[in-house]
Image (cartoon, rainbow, N blue to C red):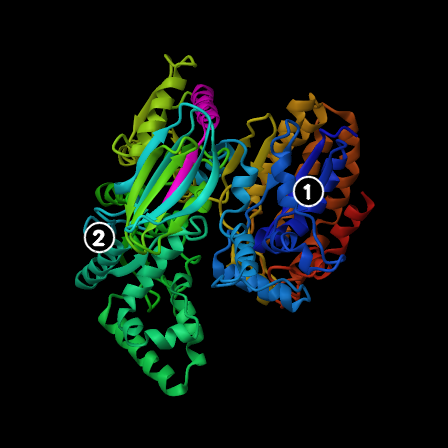
Amino acid sequence: MSSSKVIYYTKTDEAPALATNSFLPIVKLFAKSADISIHLKDISLAARILSQFPEYLSESQKVEDDLKFLGDLAKDPEANIIKLPNISASIPQLKYAIKELQSKGFAIPNYPDKSNTPEEIKIKKTYDKIKGSAVNPVLREGNSDRRAPKAVKNFAKNNPHSMGAWSNKSKTHVSSMTSGDFFGSEKSATFSEKSTVKITFEDASGVQEVLKNNIPILEGEIIDTAVMSLGKLESFFREQITDAKNKEILFSLHMKATMMKVSDPIIFGKCVEVFYDQIFQTYKNELSSIGVNLNNGSGDLFSKLHLLDNNTEQKIRSLIDEVHTLNPDLAMVDSDKGITNLHVPSDVIIDASMPAMIRNSGKMWNKKGESQDVKAVIPDRSYASIYQATIDFCKLNGAFDPTSMGSVSNVGLMAQKAEEYGSHDKTFQLDNTGTVKVINSKNEILLEQAVSKGDVFRMCQVKDAPIKDWVKLAVSRAKATNTPAVFWLDNNRSHDIEIIKKVNKYLQNHETDSLEIHILSPKDATDFSLKRIKEGLDTISVTGNVLRDYLTDLFPIIELGTSAKMLSIVPLMNGGGLFETGAGGSAPKHVQQFVSEGYLRWDSLGEFLALSVSLEHLGQKNKDKKCRILSETLDLATEKLLLENKSPSRKLGSIDNRGSHFYLALYWSELLCNQNDDSDLADYFKEVFSYLKLNEDAINKELLQAQSQEQDINGYYLTDIELTKKAMCPSSLLNKIFSEA
């Protein structure tokens, strides 16, 4: 078998991981017909943790570092990787995973909240590499091409999702800092030659500390530095809490603590501290004694109060009730359980929470389970304007109509850890007042920032080659679709000014006379795109890494009702392909429902789409007809699945994730046995289709009978392999054809 006919499939977390147990046998059955080998690689949070601590494990417990393997593979021209959504772990999630693994006999160390000894420092540094978006920068050796496939878009138009009506009297708005944020403090520079830099801190007395050393910089690379002022952030939060109370609207904080794993938890924690200011001022020592960490959210406070003496606990609980009365109502994550917007930093993720709010008439849920206007607090101004512009547009024009609206695809700059999501190891909270400097190997100061105690400093990098590739991808998409392409770049932002110079330079490498290409600020680009959407016209957004993430939720959620149905292709810079299953997160609530009810409503549509383009890529690379036919028929099968309404519903007793997999296999095999391009494939799948069709009712019955009962999978972050397989593959008739294949 040719090594180039290998697809590397990822095992991840939560709902996508459960679904893989059901879908992968189908993938292997169909792949076998074209001599394609499917290799499963485990990049789940549990596997990532275990792979980093081999010295704590027995030989039988050790696991391979599959993420490193795939990271190396991504640079291989033959790479073909299908990547499902994974947990971008916050500290609470990381700690839960560690605790579960320890309970199963893995003697890994605890996450040290404070690292004083060399061993603790080493352990914390190892765990910090696992936090947040650890997977994405490793795998993304290319830029992103995300769009709604034609079949999905047509289905959405014919079966529109619900959109809440908008009123021009809505009080909903976005609030951001006017100074002291990353946007306002940003400085940027482009390197003319290859170099090595270090980040140092110098205090008021001239004492220097190296924060990070030996950072390699390539010729043409852009670096930028920025600071979030903790003092101005605190004042900002106080103002917004008061304003929300006066306006009688909900207070909500929208961050991305899972991705911006150093800066955003600090910002989140400061908001919690200010909101519950009376409690932390009065009981500072008591809360410190039980290890309350504000960066983990108010839930960390609530969960540890029982560690205090009963009298103190009751006094604090009474004061919490008083605070909730005096302050504005908080937007809720779960009204029934009393989980607020400030409970856990990983609960409210900006790229999902803001579009959901916009889709819901600009409202979020209050403590009574009712929708209410909201103050959406986004401290840093860098991208906040896109949401305010969308809100303003909806107030003026009303809700969008999914039956007629256009589409906004995205070409995203993300290769080689581009921009803000690659900044984690260069983000620091300063313990003293002084100056942070970026210094090259010649001891020249390139950039410097004045900081005060508690401020957050970050440095980001963007290499030249990814920008060049990004421009090329944008032009090729504009040509292929005859659609305007808009670079979302702000000429009032230091970083973007440097990017604009390169965009203008590399656009000259391409024939663009017949194309409509714009460079607009994020606000202006939003207005431009929304106007076209309203008119039923399509637009390509060409953005940096963070906006790539935000927009591939914002527009799909407005257009399709979900971002999980996006086609996500990453043409790797060395010639391989990474095929992601769109957005949609890892859906922890779906897991909870599955365990309690035996019903998994996770939709694997993104997985079907990713598999199709993966097969297409194999076909093109190897000039392999069978791969091409598999891809083409899978697209048609997916379209039929949508038209026949065989996607998972939300209602127990109806088709769930496992049932949708069965019907995809049924439709796919039917199309393959009826095609005339390849007789071998037709013969191979004739028997498969006949068997599935003959047993359709019986298989459906077995799948439905597995619902309405609790499922034992013995774990959350590391489930039992056999129990999970049994739960996700409950049809003996369906299993039979896989075992015989």
Q: Residue at x 35, y 66 (%)?
A: 369
- Camera-side residue of 353 and 658: 353
- Camera-side residue of 471 and 650: 471
Looking at the picture, how far across and down is residue 356, in whole percent? 38, 51
Give, as a single range, the part of the protein colored magenta.
458-481
Q: Which mark is residue 666?
A: 1
The residue that label 2 is drawn on is 170
Q: Residue at x 41, y 44 (%)?
A: 557
- Residue 402 magenta: no
Looking at the picture, how far across and down is residue 703, in whole percent? 67, 57
Q: Residues within 10 Å of mark 1 (few under 14, many from 20)?
A: many
Q: Residue at x 48, y 56 (%)?
A: 90
Left or right side of 288 for 672: right
Q: Amino acid at mark 1?
A: Leu
474, above or below 656, in the image:
above
313, above or below 127, in the image:
below
Indicate the quadrant where residue 617 lies. top right
